[in-house]
Image (cartoon, grey):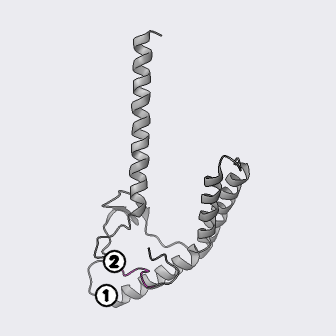
Amino acid sequence: MSNARKELKERIQAIEEEIRKAKRAKDKLLIDCAHQSKKGKLKLINISGDVYKCKFCDVKFSLQPVSQGKLDEAIKVLHNVIQQIRSFSDQEKDVKLIRHLGEIDFNLTELPDIYSAIMSQYKKDSKDRKDDDDDIGFTGLRSLSFVDKK
């Protein structure tokens, strides 16, 4: 390979790496997106059926309710994946990763209670706002004690 081609290939790889870094940085910023306006109104666009896209962060997800059984199974699968990753990680080099995964696993145990509370609140709010034309807006979990109030 000629020197010019090698240099071009290296420059392209460097740019691709910068693009990956920028995408990761953008994705980290979007962690804070609550899919709502400052007033608490959901900012979702219906794509098809029960699938919506956030106007702010472009994440797509279903608003189809999840059964307790499916939620429990999903948590069990994620728990097993997390524990496998932790088991095969280097305990000296991957200290932050092991700790972070442990925190995620710990927080997963709270998901059923949080999901149950938010769905109960949504159903209550749905009954309270029969004339409201925002069919997916609700007050959320702001008053519940187990939600982080940072």
Q: Specify the label residue 55 is tagged with.
A: none
Type of amino acid under label 2: Gly
Residue 127 percent across, percent down from the top left? 37, 89
Q: Which residue is mark 2?
A: 137
Q: Residue at x 26, y 87 (%)?
A: 131
Q: Relative to residue 145, is residue 81 drawn left or right? A: right
Residue 37 percent across, percent down from the top left? 29, 70
The reply to whether residue 145 is in sight is yes
Q: Which residue is mark 1?
A: 129
Stretch in magenta: 135-143
Relative to residue 125, is residue 44 depicted above or below?
above
Q: Residue at x 59, y 63 (%)?
A: 104
Relative to residue 39, is residue 45 depicted above or below?
above
Q: Relative to residue 37, is residue 20 drawn left or right? A: right
SS at mark 2?
A: loop
- Asked whether the beta carbons under mark 2 and mark 1 sit within 8 Å of each other, the answer is yes
Q: Relative to residue 2, is residue 37 drawn left or right? A: left
Dot 1 alpha-carbon crowd within 10 angstroms: few under 14, some 14 to 19, many 20 or more: few
